[in-house]
Amino acid sequence: MTDLAEGVEAQALESQVAGRSAESAGVQRMTPSEAFVETMAANGVDTIFGIMGSAFMDAMDIFAPAGIRLVPVVHEQGAAHMADGYSRASGRHGVCIGQNGPGISNCVTAIAAAFWAHSPVVIVTPETGSMGIGLGGFQEANQLPMFQEFTKYQGHVNNPKRMAEITARCFDRAHSELGPTQLNIPRDYFYGELECEVPQPQVLDRGPGGTKSLDEAAELLATAKFPVIVSGGGVVMADGVEECKALAERLGAPVVNSYQHNDSFPASHPLWCGPLGYQGSKAAMKLISQADVVLALGTRLGPFGTLPQHGMDYWPKDAKIIQVDADHKMLGLVKKISVGICGDAKEAAAALTDRLRDRTLACDGTRDERADRIASEKQDWEAELDEWTHERDDYSLDMIAEAEGEDGNWLHPRQVLRELEKAMPEHVMVSTDIGNINSVAHSYLRFEEPRSFFAPMSFGNCGYALPTIIGAKAAAMDRPAISYAGDGAWSMSMTEIMTAVRHHIPVTSVVFHNRQWGAEKKNQVDFYNRRFVAGELDNPSFAEVARSMGAEGVTVDKLEDVGPALQAAVKAQMEDGVTTVIEIMCTRELGDPFRRDALAKPVRLLKKYQDYV
């Protein structure tokens, strides 16, 4: 174990000790700041991401003796993304904080991303003092409405005597509701005296679902001839991969990952078929298209994971769907279902396996045939990926030809992604940003364990990958941490490299330098006759920028150097605590758009715009 990892473990131990001392203390006289900090300690908080501010300085002053480290970031959006990554990597709360007003408003986008990732993030929002609210004072803002669409619960401390109570409720609700919560505290309410007992965490014991729905689901699975399991983020959050494996093996069922949850089933397993959805696995899509029963385990079946892709409308029209979700509001929301189970994905999978263990199943007789079909489809898809060295549409072919006449050497993104895949270390964690190359990467990112893949999910904001992987690394210092981003998205958050360097949280950032906003530019190719507006990027050397921030910077323009560059960077990260930016020089070719139905061919009625069609 590295010294860095030992330091984080020591802080976590101190936090646990603080929590135990609070548990045995009973009612005590304390200040609201002490009640706030002790309640966080009772919840095992050892790391908070943010930027210091006068609004919470009284509490911040006692973070250290409580075993809590404040990691100062460059921008508060990065703090909330780091809290998200920390939470997704650890399964524990992620916590962020900032100065009232602008510090808090900077976090809105990242909290929205955490909301769609179902991350138990607690954002602490100190606000204007209670006697100044409504007077238009310095840095005043109405902070609760900012987050109402993206939080599961909003706790407002309306009296300093309720500090511990409301703080505890925000932490409890973040876990029980599976999403961010907001703790809003008028800045003068950190001061004073009160008597209280620090509440201990309430851990929700989730069950497998109702007996009736489980029995109905088991009956459907028992009579299925070609069952397919969609393993979603709920499987990861419930630590239910082993239970999903056991159920899949009992059924002999292919398992496909839901969109952007490539870590929800081990890629080395014979039944793994890859991700559905945008830029996903053709093998997964072809196999689920044959299903007569689909078990959607821990997934809301969001649109990006079920829409046509690769020219295939693969979602089975006549299949019976069993959906398992811990949130009853998700059941049947996107797809018509036959059985809905409101329950924990892990417990539900175990309960279904128990019900099927001694039964004769309709699919038992075709187990070997289906196994051969699974292997064949996967083999065909891998062969296609090997041969798919570059994009083949007219625009991409033009860009490849153009690159051949330019100075420098430019690499095909798909070849780069394949080489990165081959060089991935064991136990790796990877975050991806939004954008064209990052989406193509879905087909090339495979994982053996959960809590390994952190994508921006449905909110899809740029600037996500780098701060999120820093947060994940802070939660798991013993694991290699790698981010993928295009040059546009990376530029939005690249200054957080300074956070990684300053605070010894080493990561490896891969930047695809293709000089364009690729995903949106693809729409200008498909719908606007290559009339490019605001899509081009004139970039500096990102490797040089990285070095100016104290990190290592490497520029790669030869395919044979891609894998060795990643391996060297990971070695430096794990052994020497070095953050590295790998800048990969890529052609301007573009993969498929996110959705072909997202835009329509332009119609122009005014004479001066007649040529713009």
Image: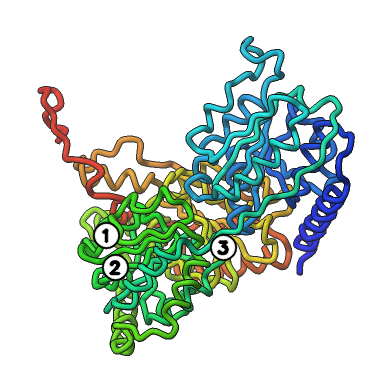
Disc 3 to disc 2: CB gap under 8 Å? no
Q: Quadrant of residue 564?
A: bottom right
- In 3D space, how far apart are the residues under numbered discs 1 and 3 (Cα atoms)? 26 Å
Disc 1 to disc 3: CB gap under 8 Å? no
Point out the tag, 3 or 2, that comes first from the N-terminus: 2
Q: Is residue 51 left or right of 606 when viewed as pictured?
A: right
- In 3D space, how far apart are the residues under numbered discs 3 and 2 (Cα atoms)? 24 Å
Residue type at the position of mark 2: Met
Residue marked by disc 1:
309
Task: Look at the numbered disc 1 and give the secondary structure of its residue.
Answer: loop
Query: Where is the C terminus found, in terms of image quarters?
Result: top left
Q: Residue at x 79, y 63 (%)?
A: 6
Point out the tag, 2 or 1, that comes first from the N-terminus: 2
Disc 2 to disc 1: CB gap under 8 Å? yes
Point out the tag, 1 or 3, that comes first from the N-terminus: 1
Residue type at the position of mark 3: Arg
Whether residue 530 appears in this view of the structure is yes
Q: Is residue 302 above or below residue 315?
A: above
Residue 437 locus on image (x, y percent): 40, 56
Foreground of the two, 143 or 421: 143
Task: Look at the numbered disc 3 and give the secondary structure of its residue.
Answer: loop
Residue marked by disc 3:
451
Q: Is residue 154 left or right of 444 when viewed as pictured?
A: right
Q: Is residue 548 above or below residue 212?
A: above
Residue marked by disc 2:
285
Whether residue 312 appears in this view of the structure is no
Foreground of the two, 426 or 171: 171
Residue type at the position of mark 1: Gln
Colour mapping: rainbow
